[in-house]
Image: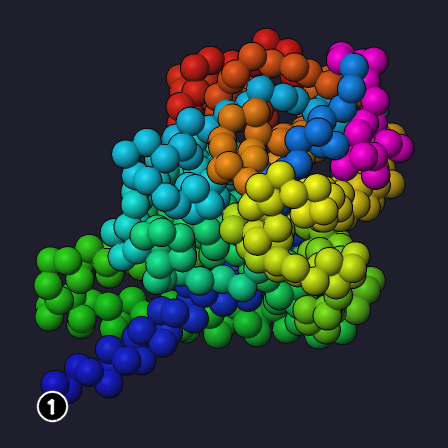
Amino acid sequence: MNPLLPNRRRFLRGLGACLSLPAFEALAPRARAADPALPIPQRLAFIYFPNGAIHQPWWPTGEGRQFTLGPTLAPLQNLQQHIQVVSGFAHKNAEAGHDGAGDHARANGTFLTGVRVKKTAGSDISAGISIDQVAAQFLAPLTRFPSLELSTDPHRKSGGCDSGYSCAYESGLAWRSPSSPLSPESNPRLVFERLFGSGDPGTRAANLARRRAQQKSILDFVRDDAQALQRQLSHRDLAKLDEYLTGVRQIEQRIHAAEHFPETPDPARETPTGIPAAYDQYIRLMFEMLALSFETDSTRVASLLLAHDGSNRSFAEIGIPEGHHSLSHHQNNPEMIAKVARIDRFYVEQLAAFLTLLESKKEADGQSILHHSTIVYGCGNSDGNRHTHSNLPILVAGGGSGKLHPGRFLRLPETPLCNLYLTLLDNLGLPHQARFGDSSGRLADI
């Protein structure tokens, strides 16, 4: 029997812990002391809802600043001055082309990358770095966490999920590299403990210090065991191991960076107990975690997958027992269309509660966190019945610290959604990016 096998098993268990458990990144004191002289940070978040939208009730009437929200977006009426609804955005790389079926996987995988994802159900997945991670790499030195990835869906990394596409494409939004999707956390308790530590208020800093020491020990163990394994692995396995160890090295870098921040925030609230049974409460709790991460400047970049494209979740909270995906293939049945439109509105109701929360939290300049944020809400699928990817349902909330001009309905000609992303990178102060995804330029006015 190979004497290295027990070590290999321990190594893989340790490696899985390092790369999967969100607590392994909850290591740092808070990044930014409450100093009014410091620039107020800009935040960037991307929120995804599944299966497209019923267009007629989604789009407002009117144009420019003279517009009226339709039934789907009506929950945002009190926030109308803080949002821009934009028609005309497209993701051409999500269209079938030569790849055939699989529009849900492409809608998810393309949404923040802008590239055509590789059609495979195996381990040879390929997409592109996502726009949130471009921003996160630039802003990483400023906060305890470069980015925060959240979901209210169970996560699946492997296997096939949509017509020959890997589940990795549907299970998240963020991609650190073309072959490395970032796993979102779906348990609000684990999100909170990752951000602030475990235990009751007042005890979390000490618990976090103990965990930091344990995590360093595990990383040392993983590194030593990896060196022993490398002598036995094939070329292909070595490539996989190198990808894993890249994640380990990034965790080590985060630990090192975390130790330079002076204090870990400790919100005066109890740790969430877990996942609420009611879906609306679940979403709102995850939105609260996202808001806390922005309020404490734990991160400035985040994504939230409300549900993967193709989700067939039912909605007992609003009296809809049928699955969302099944209903989205309505074939112009008026009753089914009405139910999908009600689901669309349900998601917007949760968004409205989140934006209201951000608007209620004020910064040193008297403006709200919402004013100093850019929140992109939308879907990579346009019409769930026909699986189209043009005229995507997209809205942009927040003021981008004065760089955005909300309170409008913009009707654009067909425009790559990546043009918006390039503009948002400019607003954040990133060095000039020549292009991103399938971008064709920048937006002159957003």
Determine whether, in the image, residue 229 is placed left or right of residue 13.
Answer: left
Image-quadrant location for residue 242: bottom left
Q: Read off the residue under disc 1.
A: 1
Colour convention:
rainbow
Res 424 visible: yes
| Front one among 52 and 442 | 52
Read off the magenta span. 63-80
Q: Residue at x 66, y 31 (%)?
A: 55
Residue 141 percent location from the top left of the image: 52, 41
| Front one among 340 and 165 | 340
Res 347 visible: no
200 shown above or below 393: below
Q: Residue at x 81, y 34 (%)?
A: 71
Residue 241 percent location from the top left of the image: 24, 61
Residue 274 percent location from the top left of the image: 68, 71
Image-quadrant location for residue 412: top right
User: Which corner quadrant holds the N terminus?
Assistant: bottom left
Residue 167 falls within the magenta-colored stretch: no
Callout 1 amino acid: Met
Asked which secondary structure carries label 1, the reply is loop
Image-quadrant location for residue 81: top right
| Front one among 197 and 263 | 197
215 shown above or below 291: below
Q: Residues within 10 Å of mark 1 (few under 14, many from 20)?
A: few
